[in-house]
């Protein structure tokens, strides 16, 4: 009986370590996300929006990690906080500041971040892996990473499956930038005008 109990405890511990949640704050964040989605009048057409940024299975990436893991820059939530890629954060911020005027930088949070947070459930559906991030952190990651990056040396990292930002979100960031910041390149006939996905 003792051996069976020990096996059960070992299996339970193993299952817990395979959880998408890794702390009590993660659990609370998950509860908050589910509650927000239920309380909001969120309608997401699953046929239109589904996972478009996938995590490569470990069985594939273990054989040749450099083919699937970015080496210079982490874009989006999967690789953003990896220590070896985080050194590019200053470059990403410099690129964002390089395309914004001073008043736009000062209003960035009100204009861009709050706008992206409206699309949180749709954004989360684009990733096939649970994102253990609060809405504000997720919006900041995508706003900074989705801005214009002008370095050709990072093209191979940008093309990696796990290191992408959903196209609808890039279009939304561009449209918001054009509308709010007075650049009329998107124009009023933008296909995303009035759509949330």
Image (spheres, rainbow, N blue to C red):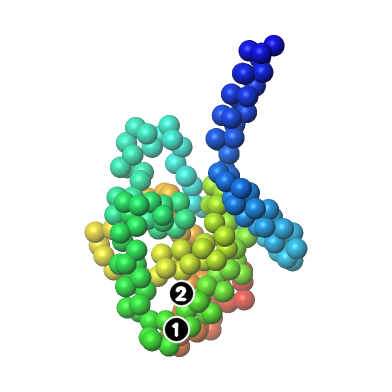
Query: Is disc 2 placed on a helix, strand or loop?
Result: helix
**Residue occupying image coordinates x 63% and y 12%:** 3
Q: Point out the frontmost of discs 2 and 1.
A: 1
Decide: is 61 above or below 30.
above
Q: Which residue is mark 2?
A: 174
Task: Describe residue 143's horizontal placement relative to residue 37 as left or right.
Answer: left
Q: Which x, y percent locates residue 63?
A: 34, 32
**Residue occupying image coordinates x 60% and y 60%:** 122
Category of crowding for the residue at label 2, using alpha-carbon neighbours closer than 10 angstroms: few (below 14), some (14–19), many (at least 20): some
The number of numbered discs placed on residues in the rendered structure image is: 2
Q: Nearer the viewer, residue 195 or 71?
A: 71
* Contact flag, marks 2 and 1 (Cβ < 8 Å): no
Q: Which residue is mark 1?
A: 106
Query: Is disc 1 placed on a helix, strand or loop?
Result: helix
Q: Quadrant of the C terminus?
A: bottom right
**Residue occupying image coordinates x 68% and y 53%:** 31
Category of crowding for the residue at label 1, using alpha-carbon neighbours closer than 10 angstroms: few (below 14), some (14–19), many (at least 20): few
CA separation in Å, label 2 and label 1 = 18 Å
């Amino acid at each position: 009986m003792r051996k069976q109990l020990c096996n059960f405890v070992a299996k339970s511990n193993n299952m817990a370590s395979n959880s998408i949640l890794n702390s009590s704050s993660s659990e609370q964040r998950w509860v908050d996300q589910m509650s927000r989605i239920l309380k909001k009048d969120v309608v997401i057409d699953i046929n239109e929006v589904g996972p478009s940024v996938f995590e490569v299975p470990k069985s594939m990436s273990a054989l040749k990690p450099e083919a699937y893991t970015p080496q210079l820059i982490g874009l989006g939530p999967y690789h953003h906080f990896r220590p070896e890629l985080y050194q590019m954060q200053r470059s990403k911020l410099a690129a964002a500041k390089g395309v914004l005027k001073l008043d736009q930088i000062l209003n960035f949070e009100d204009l861009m971040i709050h706008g992206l947070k409206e699309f949180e459930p749709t954004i989360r559906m684009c990733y096939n892996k649970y994102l253990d991030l609060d809405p504000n952190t997720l919006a900041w990651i995508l706003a900074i990473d989705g801005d214009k990056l002008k370095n050709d040396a990072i093209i191979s990292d940008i093309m990696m499956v796990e290191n992408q930002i959903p196209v609808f979100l890039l279009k939304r960031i561009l449209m918001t930038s054009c509308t709010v910041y007075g650049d009329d390149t998107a124009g009023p006939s933008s296909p995303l005008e009035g759509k949330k996905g």
